[in-house]
Image (cartoon, grey):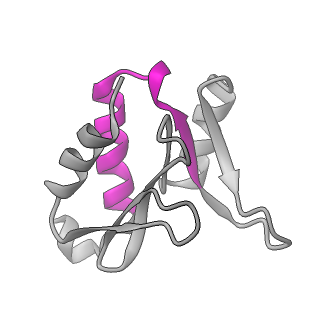
Amino acid sequence: MATTEDIRRWAMALPEVGETSHFRFHVPVFQVRGRTFLGMGRDETTAVFCIDEQEANDAAAEDPAVFEAVRRPDARRSFLGLQVRLADVDDERVRELVERAWRQQAPKRLTR
């Protein structure tokens, strides 16, 4: 299982990444140029990756016990990302999701 430390190491190795703490849940959140691309769940057994919405929906449809496309709980219900139960996904897939989320949120000039 990928741990918070593994995810931190993979995320911080990417260009222009900073770590902050979620304002309410006090868990690690990773940003590229001020844009969140990854946040750990409250108990750090899950993580939310800010990837393409269709990709998230496809993963959730494929294995709903492991993946969930999450939306804001408010009236806007806007898409947030793909929540992943870390214990059920191999490290390589988690690392791939870290990179995909970074690419999704980073300025295109930076991803080249």
Residue 40 higher or lower than 88, as above or below = below
Number of numbered discs overlaid on the protein picture:
0
Q: Position of residue 45 (x, y in %)?
A: 49, 34
Q: Which residue is at a point 20% across and 76% down the rendered structure image?
A: 109
Position of 26 relative to 88 (above/below): below
Query: Which residue is at the front of the view, 15 or 27?
Result: 27
- Residue 99 painted magenta: yes
Asked which quadrant contains residue 57, the reply is: top right
Does 88 sit above or below residue 37? above
Q: Residue furthest right?
A: 75
In the displayed structure, does residue 39 sit left or right of residue 108? right
- Residue 103 part of the magenta-drawn span: yes
Q: Which residues are magenta?
A: 81-104
- Looking at the rendered image, the quarter that the C terminus falls into is bottom left
Provide residue 68's location: percent of width, then percent of height. Answer: 65, 39
Q: Residue furthest bottom?
A: 34
Q: Residue 31, image x and y in percent?
A: 34, 68
Q: Name the residue rendered at 56%, 48% in the picture.
A: 42
Q: Tell me which corner region of the image, top left, top right, bottom left or bottom right, holds residue 63.
A: top right
Give how far across and how far down residue 99 sits, in percent. Answer: 29, 49
Q: Main secondary structure of the magenta part?
A: helix
Residue at figure coordinates x 24%, y 53% from the top left? 11
- Quadrant of the rendering where the N terminus is positioned: top left
The residue lying toward the viewer, choosing from 97 and 72, is 72
Instruction: Please give left or right for residue 82 compared with residue 111 in the image.
Output: right
**In this picture, is 101 found above or below 87?**
below
